[in-house]
Amino acid sequence: MRPGPLRFGWLRPVGLILAAPLIAGALWSCGSTPATPSLAPEPPATGSTPSGSGPISTLRMVAGNRLIGTAVALPQLQTDTGYQEVLAREFNAVTPENALKWGPVEPAQGTFDWSGADEIVAFAQAHGQKVRGHTLVWHNQLPGWLSGGTFTSAQLGEILKNHIATEVGRYAGKIYAWDVVNEPFADDGTWRDTIWLRGLGQGYVADALRWARAADPIAKLYINDYDNEGINAKSDAMYELVKSLKAQGVPLDGVGIQAHYDLAKPFPSDIAANLRRFADLGLEVAFTELDARFQLPATESALAQQATYYGQTVSACLAVSACVGVTVWGFTDKYSWVPFSFPGEGAACLYDENLVPKAAYGAVLAALTARTP
Ligand code: 9MR
């Protein structure tokens, strides 16, 4: 059972800076946005209030050349016009939350379904948004034929190679970056026990990257994981892996840092140093799944703490030139994954369940606005 709609007294404490996007949203929804959002033009680079009293900012307007992205899922993209408007107005990048994962894409061996991903990519193209591809090699959301099958190592390698070649090849030129390998490490920094590790050994990571590069010579290729924001056992394991891959000449462009925060845990103090050590290896970095959950009900102090987690993460990215941007894992509490995985917790996103921006939105807007170009 999901929690009911939350009501926040956000406007009083945070003031007009948060009202601006709402006004902008109203203008777009009443004004220039056509009824079919996927055909809507890209939002203008600047805006102004009807009275001409001053500029209106949205996240994408102040992001410069950094990505400010969000995970996007169906069916909300097809059915919720308020969701569509915020998505088009605020973000310059999208990541299909589930539509590119193995289960939806290859539900039967050799049979591919692109329908969900195609819709998201079409929306992104119509709105001038880049697309991050998520994800090719993961231990979750695998179809039954694969997770329950019995394969030799050679067969499993062929299955993986074919999946990567087909999926990456289909979206070559349309997907800017791929999370080729997702979550290869366990929480203690040892290799995660998966069908890929058991069947192919640690070399599956290098093979997957090479197959992805063969299918798209341009796309940025990432390894992505969670709980690796600061310097710890898990980010150390990632560091050693990517250093070794670079030394071997394996095609790898970036490290993804998911950033699923839990407000019960302190904010990692050494994020910038962690980003820099990856940058020093010649890699780019990105925050790929940012959100910040806490025990409900929401209080003003929890929302304020959440705002600092969001703002500090964006600022940490902006402080390191190799950090290409930040993607939030869904922008509204209305559709967040959190209450399903952490019963009793939630309110992890920038917008509440009524698509009203929270203090976290203001913190991200302020951090982006403060960036030095
Ligand atoms: O948000 C996704 C949710 O809708 C899916 O049910 C879930 C399946 O495991 O995956 C969620 O996204 C995950 C992402 O793909 C990888 N990092 C952790 C994310 C949250 O679980």
Image (cartoon, rainbow, N blue to C red):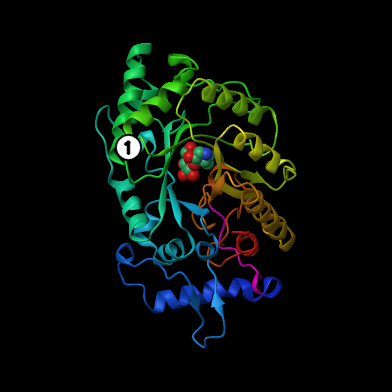
Residue 155 in the image, given as x and y percentages of width and height: 32, 15
Q: Residue furthest bottom?
A: 51
Query: What residue is rendered at 62% in x and 73% in y?
Result: 17
x 44%, y 51%: residue = 94
Horizontal side of residue 133 vs 190, given as left or right: left
Left or right of residue 202: residue 342: right
Instruction: Estimate the x, y position of residue 154 in percent, counting from the top left.
Output: 34, 12
**Residue 167 on image: x %, y %:** 32, 35
Residue 176 pos. (x, y %): 40, 45
Q: Main secondary structure of the magenta part?
A: loop
User: Is residue 295 visible to us here?
Assistant: no
- Quadrant of res 228: top right
Which residues, given as a range, are shown in magenta? Answer: 1-11
Q: Which amino acid, by three-letter code, is at mark 1?
A: Val
Outermost residue, left direction? Answer: 111
Residue at the image position 46 percent from the left and 57 percent from the top: 92
Magenta stretch containing residue 214, yes or no? no
Check disc 1 and report the residue beneath it: 105
